[in-house]
Image (cartoon, rainbow, N blue to C red):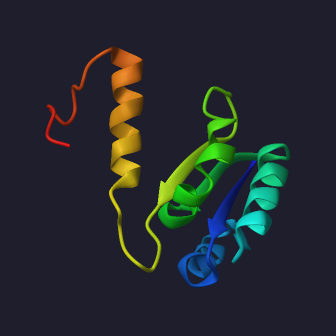
């Protein structure tokens, strides 16, 4: 059975544990990269990652973009929303249908 994980700074992710998700607080780049690799190659189908951490780990995340699993989904952290998640949704929709049918070139 697949699991769901949340990766990011402790303050941003500790609330997700109350929802039953596995949380992995990280504070350093190398620790985050190692944890992401372990989660992606393990039993996790969905990995939520804070937007700020996603920006740091873009190279590592790019390895999994063309893979069926896991789905790596950015979420806002305590510092707020950077808009990175919405840009990723827009890019995915454009790739799937060939044009921007949701945002109509607004973002």
Q: In which quarter of the image is the N terminus?
A: top right
Q: Which residue is drawn at 37% across and 74% down?
A: 80
Total marks drawn?
0
Compared with residue 6, is residue 46 higher up or lower down, i.e. above or below?
A: above
Compared with residue 30, is residue 47 higher up or lower down, i.e. above or below?
A: above
Towards the viewer: 59 or 87: 59
Towards the viewer: 98 or 58: 58
| Furthest residue toward top | 98
Q: Is residue 101 left or right of residue 54?
A: left
Q: Residue at x 34, y 16 (%)?
A: 97
Q: In which quarter of the image is the C terminus?
A: top left
Compared with residue 9, is residue 48 higher up or lower down, i.e. above or below?
A: above
| Furthest residue toward bottom | 11
Give the image location of residue 32, x and y in percent: 73, 64
Q: Residue at x 34, y 48 (%)?
A: 86
Q: Which residue is drawn at 62% across and 70% down?
A: 8
Give the image location of residue 63, x and y in percent: 69, 35
Compared with residue 83, is residue 13 higher up or lower down, i.e. above or below?
A: below
Towards the viewer: 33 or 16: 33
Give the image location of residue 4, x and y in percent: 69, 55
Q: In this view, does 63 lie to the left or right of 41?
A: left
Towards the viewer: 61 or 92: 61
Give the image location of residue 17, x and y in percent: 66, 75
């Amino acid at each position: 059975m697949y699991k769901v994980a949340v990766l990011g700074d402790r303050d941003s992710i500790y609330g997700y544990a109350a929802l039953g998700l596995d949380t992995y607080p990280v504070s350093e780049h190398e620790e985050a990269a190692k944890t992401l690799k372990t989660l992606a190659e393990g039993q996790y189908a969905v990995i939520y990652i804070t937007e700020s951490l996603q920006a740091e780990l873009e190279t590592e995340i790019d390895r999994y973009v063309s893979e069926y699993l896991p789905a790596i989904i950015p979420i806002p952290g305590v510092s707020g929303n950077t808009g990175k998640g919405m840009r990723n949704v827009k890019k995915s929709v454009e790739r799937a249908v060939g044009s921007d049918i949701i945002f109509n070139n607004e973002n």
